[in-house]
């Protein structure tokens, strides 16, 4: 009888331990899920606050205090417009027949350009051809048709050099140099025969290509979100300046 009572006690203890383990596991999972849900909610709110800061900075044209914006009193942080200039720039990925407008003078309005840049410019791209249009200060045009180094996509186009020599990064496979640029306000590069990013690198610091807004918001619980937005200056529609070679 003592042996049987011992077995019953052991089985009872094991059942209680199993039940306790299940209960603790369910409780832990529930607590963890609740915490993750709250964290995700805080993360989404912080992201929305950072995006609101970007909108405010663009609208005001100055530093925006996120905590002072309507409905965002529970957040701290700010959004600011950066004006740092460099001698290089890389576009987003451009698809076939898309183009990008580069600014070679300081831009304040469609009819107001100043401080025209001068120097040598290297244009870098992938295995595609480019139609390059320079718009001078007197609105005259100069055009170049540039093929990649390994093929002839545009009839009678000039050939680029192979490699990424003097490019903003090593991923480019072709480069073409324009020497002694002056009195030019815009350069438009149109992609022909594929898709590519376009990088430019100047012999000196280039004019700003747009506005970079950096916004960071932090909640009371410590969740932080940072958003960086680049807003280019106006892009000329792709159906302008289209030619056939």
Image (cartoon, grey):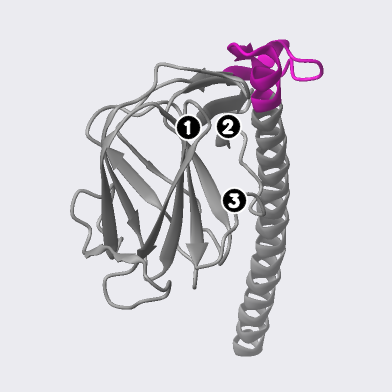
The residue lying toward the viewer, choosing from 227 and 173, is: 173
Q: Which mark is drawn over residue 233?
A: 2
Separation of residues labelled 2 and 3 (CA atoms): 18 Å
Q: Is residue 143 left or right of residue 228?
A: left
Name the residue nearer the viewer: 52 or 109: 109
Q: Which residue is mark 1?
A: 209
Question: The magenta stretch spans which residues?
Answer: 53-78
- At x 25%, y 57%, the residue is 170
Answer few, some or many: residues within 10 Å of disc 1's Cα (few below 14, many 20 plus, some between 14 and 19): many
- The numbered mark, 2 or 1, whose residue comes first in the sequence reads 1
Neighbour tally class for label 3: few under 14, some 14-19, many 20 plus, Cα within 10 Å: some
* Percent coordinates x, y for residue 85 in the rendering: 36, 25
Residue pointed to by mark 3? 241
N-terminal-most mark, 2 or 3: 2
Task: Indicate the quadrant containing the N terminus: top left, top right, bottom left or bottom right.
Answer: bottom right
Q: Is residue 178 magenta?
A: no
Number of the front mark, 2 or 3: 3
């Amino acid at each position: 009888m003592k042996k049987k009572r011992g077995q019953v006690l052991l089985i009872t203890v094991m059942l209680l331990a199993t039940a306790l383990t299940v209960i603790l596991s369910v409780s832990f999972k529930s607590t963890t899920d609740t915490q993750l849900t709250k964290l995700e909610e805080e993360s989404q709110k912080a992201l929305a606050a950072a995006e609101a800061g970007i909108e405010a900075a663009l609208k005001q044209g100055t530093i925006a205090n996120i905590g002072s914006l309507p409905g965002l009193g529970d957040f701290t942080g700010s959004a600011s417009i950066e004006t740092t200039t460099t001698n290089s720039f890389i576009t987003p990925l451009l698809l076939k027949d898309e183009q990008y407008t580069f600014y070679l003078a300081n831009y304040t309005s469609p009819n107001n350009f100043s401080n025209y840049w001068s120097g040598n410019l290297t244009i870098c791209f992938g295995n595609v051809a480019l139609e390059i249009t320079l718009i001078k200060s007197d609105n005259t045009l100069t055009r170049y048709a540039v093929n990649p180094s390994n093929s002839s996509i545009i009839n009678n186009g000039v050939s680029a050099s192979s490699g990424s020599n003097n490019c903003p990064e090593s991923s480019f496979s072709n480069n073409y140099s324009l020497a002694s640029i002056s009195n030019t306000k815009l350069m438009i590069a149109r992609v022909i025969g594929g898709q590519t990013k376009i990088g430019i690198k100047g012999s000196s610091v280039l004019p700003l290509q747009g506005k970079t807004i950096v916004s960071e918001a932090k909640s009371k619980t410590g969740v932080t979100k940072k958003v960086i937005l680049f807003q280019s200056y106006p892009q000329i529609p792709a159906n302008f300046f289209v030619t056939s070679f």
